[in-house]
Image: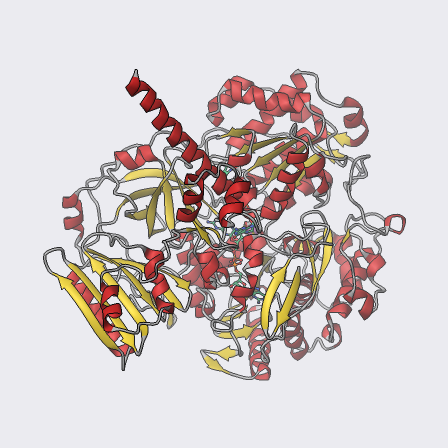
Amino acid sequence: MLVNTINGEVSVDGDKAHPANYGRLCSKGYALADTLSDTNRLLRPEIHGSPVSWNAAIECIAEKFQTVIDTHGPESIAFYVSGQLLTEDYYVVNKFVKGYLGTANIDTNSRLCMASSVAGHKRAFGSDTVPGCYEDLELADVIVLTGSNLAWCHPVLFQRILKAKAANPAMKIVVIDPRKTATVDQSDLHLQLKAGGESDLVLFTGLLQYLAQKKCLDHDWIDRYTNNLIDALAAAKQWTVDKVAGVTGLTKQELIRFYSLYQQHEKIVTVYSQGVNQSHKGTDTVNSIINVHLATGRIGREGCGPFSITGQPNAMGGREVGGLANMLACHMDIENKKHQSVVQRYWNSPNIAQSLGLKAIDLFDAVKSGKIKALWVMATNPADSMPKADEVSKAIAACPFVVVSDVVRDTDTTNLADVLLPARAWSEKDGTVTNSERRISRQRAFRTAPVDTRPDWWAVSRVAQHMGFTDAFSFERVSEIFSEYAGLSGFENHGSRDFDISELQELNEEDYDSLTPVQWPLKPLASSGTKRMFGRGGFYSVDGKANFVPIVVETKHERAGESPVNEQTEKRSARATNGNDTTGGKSIVRKTTSSRIASDKISQIGFSERTFLLNTGRIRDQWHTMTRTGASARLSAHLSEPFVEIHPLDAAAMRLQEAAIMDVISEHGTIQVRSLVTDRVAPGNLFIPMHWSNQYAANARVNTLVHSARDPVSGQPALKNQRVKMRMSVMGSYGFMVSRKQPDLRDCEYWSSVPIADGWKTEFASKSPPDELTLAIEEIACESLIGAEQIQFSDARSSSFRSCWFAGNQLHQATFISSKPVELARTSVASLLVHSFDSSADQIAVLSGVGLSDSEDGGAIVCSCMQVGINSIQRSIGNGCFTVQSVGDSCGAGTQCGTCRSEITRLIENDTVSREKVSTEKVVASV
Ligand SMILES: Nc1nc2c(c(=O)[nH]1)N[C@H]1C(S)=C(S)[C@@H](COP(=O)(O)OP(=O)(O)OC[C@H]3O[C@@H](n4cnc5c(=O)[nH]c(N)nc54)[C@H](O)[C@@H]3O)O[C@H]1N2
Ligand SMILES: Nc1nc2c(c(=O)[nH]1)N[C@H]1C(S)=C(S)[C@@H](COP(=O)(O)OP(=O)(O)OC[C@H]3O[C@@H](n4cnc5c(=O)[nH]c(N)nc54)[C@H](O)[C@@H]3O)O[C@H]1N2
Ligand SMILES: [Mo]
């Protein structure tokens, strides 16, 4: 990535020379400059909310940790870190915990992300190795994407694939997903299997059986390089096409079409991501995919391979430094005595961890039970991203001593900390990261960091030194850390471990700074890096052979996608509101709700409640818990409210109003989100994005609903598979507001705010009637908008209230409240904050809710890079632009990062369908 700074303004461009993206960036990449504002930055260390010096914070942490260790032993300390750290940060914190504190209680958000892939790789290859490289995706004849929404989550890679497909139209893209995603829009075949955790497992086990039956296995390769085929085939034997169809909900024709692709084409890559990993059978599913590739020798060759795609910038680096609670640095295992000794001697560590540490869910369970007395969370937001998120939040709040290192001041986790440490952000820190194809890249700081922020490795090193480990943590520069780490990768390795970058240990600071991207392993014979591995065996198991893993499936599980049971529950209690829940003096839910309509009243209204299977995941323009992307007006314009996707048939059965506010309920919690009726989800399924936190919505954290069921091998939680109930949330009033500051809407059961140019735009709703809600909101406005002047309008008959506050010729706040959802052109009203109101007629016109500018309302943003809305795109289509290219030429949409091209395609297709429908109707009419 290239960054330009002109007069202090930062702009971002792709690096055309980087082999992973060749200069392309995604919408979030282009908007990175927007997320760099200092407004929500954590700028100074804090203890219990008061700013302190770094020395004071470090002393406090070191002393507290020492006391806890002296009193309760090292196992009462835990660290929860993240794939958003750079490799050097990650290495130092692991060295500190596993080598010097003497516990392995350090786990990472990669547990929620790729632990099943790690475990699957290790079972099959003896090491956590991704065998292929991105180029294979361009060379393949068939790309199978399962449980991956590549178009939205890895848009740069996806654009690379689409470009390769344009050059080679015979290339086929297959998408396996219970939802019709933007990736599906660009595919040749969509297998919309039943969600619920076992479909993929059975699908790929059935594929192995099918290929064996069709005599398509590569026995020569298998004999030379693998073990255990017989057992794997025996276990797969029962999975006939008919049986697979029964479990997956796919037709026999679909299955045969899919299976015969593996029969007819040589070069196949099977890409998988969270739809596979985040399941209670994640590791077995990974192995069912790898089994197929081993059985056909499709590994380590051009255009072939199983390919686990990672998500976070440095998830792979984290695996390499041993970030997980069951690993040691440089792909060594904690429970392997030899590895323990290698690492202990290299570090000269006094107290190396001897046994497995706690994995994420167990770790927070131990926090909850009180076993963990001190916790350090670094670069992750578990109060939102962990399953059973309310329970996790309460556990953190109740933990006696909590340190949180972050770049943002207010997150749902920083608000629970005793000590806050301000970290350097990606633009300000220096180090290396590794991507999904084992490629290590230098990440260089390009922006001066706020004075009191420090890199995470620095903070950890200083605490370690303060605890007496002076020499082992005397790092002053990242290059020193990298050299030490590179040295360990080669120490007593002799080819026994896959991860070897020891060629790089002698780099001086200058060489390190100018390091060009390189793929490990780096061995003397291949010091330019290794593209592919295992083509001719060479696995890291005891005998150097790969292992087939026999897949045993017990199909007892709930079947997803069945038509929902209409549960007209008699006893319908009011929402389980999360009132002012405080534990240990720390507030958990920032904006609280109070239900003022009694439960009996809700049941009188009698909306139906139904049971669904809830799937969760990502949207195009938000990153995880929105701590940074949520601050970008540009990115928040794409999908700006927390929503639940529901199929039109289910919506009709529930008599849902358009864009209704819904209560979604599980045994763990209740949230409120807006309904989005779409055939992208299957009947009986729902989809809710993982992103919204208490910072941007009243109560929309999806993980408060999600169970902590997990894969038994990897410990990765099944985040995409939760039974829930859903019903319409009955509201007494609805509102819309634009304001300079994020409003305080504590009186509203529902609100959702997004930043816009010079202010905020907020949707809200309340159980109270409009007059009461208006009073409450105007009271807060009176207190906070001192000196401003108000004009207002109310219509008692339609229960509609409008109020505007002006200071000089600037609008400060405009509020629209009604007993029904407010009808207004949102984008026009939002633009009024940057308008100058020079006459009182102008001011009064706002009350009509009409934008004052002549420009047409562009509508909800589809193309974030060029800021083009749906209305503008539809106008272009209406004017005869029927290709993505011509839409781009006409209004600019889709011409930058390309991530929105699949949505533009769908708009064109919808338009074609409706035009065809009209013309067919005309034909019918004329007949
Ligand atoms: N825009 C954006 N991009 C991101 C991120 C982000 O937050 N925002 N995060 C990054 C990170 S850390 C990660 S890990 C990656 C994740 O990237 P992905 O794994 O592509 O993202 P998800 O949306 O979590 O899930 C992918 C798909 O799995 C499907 N799925 C659910 N259940 C099943 C099932 O049983 N079988 C199958 N076959 N599919 C199923 C979902 O419908 C969803 O479309 O994205 C990375 N990229
Ligand atoms: N329901 C559901 N839950 C999920 C998922 C899902 O698909 N569904 N996906 C899971 C997956 S794959 C993932 S990866 C996780 C992600 O979940 P989290 O890791 O919790 O998400 P982020 O919002 O990325 O949190 C990163 C935090 O680190 C801060 N930060 C950024 N850079 C730095 C830095 O350099 N140093 C420090 N100290 N702090 C920094 C950010 O401000 C932010 O607060 O969520 C998981 N949870
Ligand atoms: Mo992830």
- Say above or below: 651 vs 794: above
Residue at 44% across / 43% down in the picture?
Answer: 876
Q: Nearer the viewer, residue 258 or 299?
A: 258
The reply to whether residue 553 is in sight is no
Q: Nearer the viewer, residue 840 or 358?
A: 840
Q: Quadrant of residue 537?
A: top right
Residue at 36% across / 66% down in the picture?
Answer: 590
Tell me if 98 is positioned left or right of 839 in this view: right
Q: Nearer the viewer, residue 908 or 389?
A: 908
Residue at 26% across / 37% down in the picture?
Answer: 654
Quadrant in the picture for the N terminus: bottom right
Q: Residue furthest left?
A: 797
- Say above or below: 453 vs 565: below
The reply to whether residue 849 is in sight is yes
- Say above or below: 205 vs 314: above
Quadrant in the picture for the C terminus: top left
Number of marks: 0
Tell me if 294 is positioned left or right of 708 in this view: right
Q: Position of residue 447 (x, y in %)?
A: 63, 72
Q: Position of residue 234 (x, y in %)?
A: 64, 22
- Say above or below: 766 vs 215: below
Q: Position of residue 139 (x, y in %)?
A: 72, 35
Q: Nearer the viewer, residue 650 or 89?
A: 650
Q: Position of residue 174 (x, y in %)?
A: 58, 31
Q: How is the image coloured?
A: secondary structure
